[in-house]
Image (cartoon, rainbow, N blue to C red):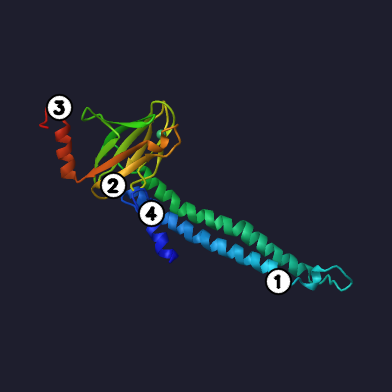
């Protein structure tokens, strides 16, 4: 009953767990791995807590003439195992595992190794509360709409004209802040044609929740046709 509910909640137009792009496909397995591992940790902690509450105290913990000094080193060793295991080994192993998977995924998402000249270049500026989308090579400016080809890396240069905004198409890639006076670069690659909703992911004032846009992903042929149609003098 709960599982179908959980699985249903993971799909949808704004779900990072329903990836439709390269970067989103990197983050979804990381998210599931962390979710699984931390669920195990939660169960282990709850079990240890229940055990600690319910167990019968040992006699050596009670003050009295019967208390023997002989089991103290053994107890100390037991405590050390918990402190070293739970306080040093477990956190170090967890962080190392996360870095081993996270750093290469981060590099791939940042486009390390992709030739910048290869990627289509689009400039996006955030305003309260809309998006200006410019295609420098086409001398074209759009509002609240981004058009890209599928299966090709696209470089977005993000900035803001007023306050800090954040560009995010959850099913395609990671979010990135848009900062006044500064240009951030975001690499996006969508798998298949479609229309994917995007949102502002940084609270930017009264109409923040309505600051939306749509990412139109075209097949390469459709994108070429779309580009031609945008040229001045093209037939309407
Ligand atoms: Cu905003």
Name the mark nearer the viewer: 2 or 1. Answer: 1
The reply to whether dot 1 and dot 4 touch (C-beta < 8 Å) is no
Q: Taking 38 as reference, is 169 above or below it?
A: above
Residue positioned most to the left: 235
**Pointer 1: what residue?**
55
Q: Specify which label sits upstream in the sequence, 1 or 4.
A: 4
Please provide percent x and percent y for residue 107. 39, 46
Q: Which of the two residues, 183 or 198, is positioned nearer the viewer here? A: 198
The reply to whether dot 4 and dot 3 touch (C-beta < 8 Å) is no
**Pointer 4: what residue?**
17
Q: Is 51 situated left or right of 130 in this image?
A: right
**Pointer 3: what residue?**
232
The reply to whether dot 2 and dot 1 touch (C-beta < 8 Å) is no
Q: Secondary structure at mark 2?
A: loop
Q: CA distance from mark 3 to mark 1?
A: 80 Å
Q: Is 1 situated left or right of 218 in this image?
A: right
Q: Taking 88 as reference, is 141 above or below it?
A: above
Q: CA distance from mark 4 to mark 2?
A: 15 Å
**Res. 16 in view:** yes
Where is the N terminus found, in terms of image quarters? bottom left
Ligand 1 closer than 8 Å to label 3 CB: no
- Which residue does the image show at 24% across and 50% down from the upper left? 192
Q: Secondary structure at mark 1?
A: loop
């Amino acid at each position: 009953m709960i599982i179908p509910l959980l699985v249903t909640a993971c799909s949808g137009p704004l779900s990072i767990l329903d990836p439709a792009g390269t970067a989103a496909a990197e983050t979804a397995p990381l998210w599931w791995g962390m979710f699984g591992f931390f669920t195990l940790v939660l169960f282990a902690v709850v079990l240890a807590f229940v055990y600690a509450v319910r167990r019968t105290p040992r006699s050596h913990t009670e003050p009295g003439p019967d208390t023997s000094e002989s089991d103290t080193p053994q107890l100390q060793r037991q405590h050390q195992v918990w402190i070293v295991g739970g306080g040093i080994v477990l956190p170090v192993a967890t962080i190392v595992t996360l870095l081993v998977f996270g750093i290469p995924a981060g590099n791939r998402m940042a486009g390390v190794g992709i030739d910048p000249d290869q990627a289509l270049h689009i400039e996006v500026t955030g305003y309260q509360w809309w998006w200006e989308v410019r295609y420098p090579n086409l001398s074209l400016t759009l509002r609240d709409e981004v058009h890209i080809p599928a299966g090709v890396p696209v470089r977005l240069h993000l900035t803001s004209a007023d306050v800090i905004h954040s560009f995010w198409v959850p099913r395609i890639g990671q979010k990135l802040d848009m900062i006044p006076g500064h240009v951030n670069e975001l690499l996006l690659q969508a798998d298949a044609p479609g229309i994917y909703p995007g949102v502002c992911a940084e609270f930017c004032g009264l109409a923040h929740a309505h600051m939306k846009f749509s990412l139109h992903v075209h097949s390469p042929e459709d994108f070429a046709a779309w580009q031609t149609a945008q040229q001045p003098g093209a037939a309407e």
